[in-house]
Image (cartoon, rainbow, N blue to C red):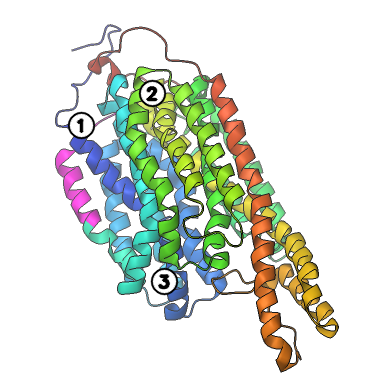
Amino acid sequence: MATPTGAPAQERPAGNPWLVLTTLCLGFFMILLDTTIVNIAIPDMSTSLDASLDQILWIINAYVLVYAVLLITAGRLGDLFGPKRLFVIGLVVFTVASAACGLASTPGQLIVFRVVQGIGGALLTPQTLATITVIFPPDKRGVAFGVWGSVAGLATVAGPTLGGYLVTDFGWEWIFFVNVPVGVLTVILALVAMPDLRLNRRHRLDWAGTALATVGLFLLVYGLIEGESHDWGAVWGPITIVEVIGAGVLVLTVFLVHQYVTRGGEPLVPFTIFKDRNFAVMSWVSAAITFGMLGLFLPLIIYLQSVLGLSALQAGFAVAPLSLVSMVIAPFAGRAADRAAGKWVLTFGLALWCAGMATVVGLAEVGTGQWGLLPGLLIAGAGLGCVFAPLQTIAMRGVPPRQAGAASGLINTTRQLGGVVGSAAVGALLQAQLTAKLTAAARSNAADLPPEVRQPFVDAVAGATGGSLHVGSGQSGAALPAGVPEQYRQALTDIATRTFHEGFTNAMKATLLLPLIVLAVAAVSCLFVRSRPAGPTPPADQRLAEAPAEV
């Protein structure tokens, strides 16, 4: 059978596409869960493994770093060798690495196994969007992407809540062991249910482009992750963080030039993808959404535990309404995006999300109760539920199936990099705001102290903001000054706690303006999206037709 253009076609994939979607979502759920669940276990891992703060940071970041830098390459490999094969390989690697993480006995071992987890996750993730794009016709993709988006919401809420339960009742190892049965089940389903798609028969990889992209992204992401811990100064001998980031940008520039020069062959990034205005705009919006999401939640989770005094599990339940509402609304938003102009659903969702989080910022005070932020979180959740499905539908609508893996890898990479930049930028801004707000709060509250301890107290708080600030639950933000008379110690402790709560709350409210601005710009950017052109839906065999790659 041939398409009207004469290109050879393959039969529409046999089997139930919804079973395939379930399989893809199970794997995707594990990957997303592992980006949030580890944070809850930090105190237990630190004690059990005798891990330093630097080692704990790498236990968290090693996974994200490797995951981000390999997504583009993994997407292209899926184009060349088939998404099913890469999906299964990624699942196996991730599942085995998860078991090894749970068995790790030293911080170094855990860091290495987290790297391997990142490799498995990167191999798996691009294949989900690529397969959905092929097995569902355009008029059904919105619902499918809505389900996919609801899984993202479920993973967001399950990370803190499931992690808190597992750590409390079983130990930190079980945040990794829980992946094993889910991984085994998903591998079996993938082998049985997933069609063996072949999106591009020319099995040739751009090795030079792969090396340049991997090195460039590694340097950029490494610099952003490590910037704060090295005070944006020296990191490797005389080499500074700024120079590492600059080198990453330079290598990525060389990568883009190389891709353009080799556009007549099979570059890692087919430039024709960016001729589609919708894909280009959605790549930026995807990065902005993750920037906003991680940027908003980083200070918020600290606020819930360190200012409001909630446990990790209670904090997880406190933000759960946002994700639960998002998960419920996402499929309906996907269906609405199929029937109407998706860009209006997406624009409305982003605007509603901004309004909800702005409400959260307004409600956040030192004395706010556990459920005091609920109105804003419900509004934000409704907006977030309207975002994921239209975004993916708009982004992937005009992408040829043979380039679906590359496109999926690109949009997932921009999303991850948006999160890395968001965390780094918001973290740096929060630190700057803490320096100003905590010092101001200390001077104000020092008036309640005896004259002889006022200045030492202010100096202690100011010194803590320079690098020794503690933001864990139950902390006051700074150690008491040395030599304080016993009769003043309780008063100092109470005032130090009040100072930290006031200063952090004020600093958080100022800091969260940055991600809100980024999200607002993303909402406006959606107005540049082209609405779906009129005309009949292409038949399945035309969607699946194999033709020479466009570059």
User: Where does residue 18 sit, x and y in percent of width and height?
Assistant: 20, 34
Dot label at residue 415: none
Question: Could you tell me how far apart the alpha carbons at marks 1 and 2 are, in whole angstroms?
Answer: 20 Å
451 left or right, relative to 428? right
Q: Earlier in the sequence, mark 1 or mark 3?
A: 1
Tag 2 residue = 337
Q: Is residue 148 above or below residue 99?
A: above
14 left or right, relative to 84? left
- The region drawn magenta spans 182-200
User: Residue drawn 53% across and 41% down?
Assistant: 356
Q: Quadrant of residue 473?
A: bottom right
Q: Is residue 375 above or below residue 480?
A: above
Question: Could you tell me how far apart the alpha carbons at marks 3 and 2 are, in whole angstroms?
Answer: 46 Å
Tag 3 residue = 109
Amino acid type, mark 3:
Gln
256 left or right, relative to 317? right
Q: Quadrant of residue 550?
A: top left
User: Residue drawn 36% across and 73% down?
Assistant: 104
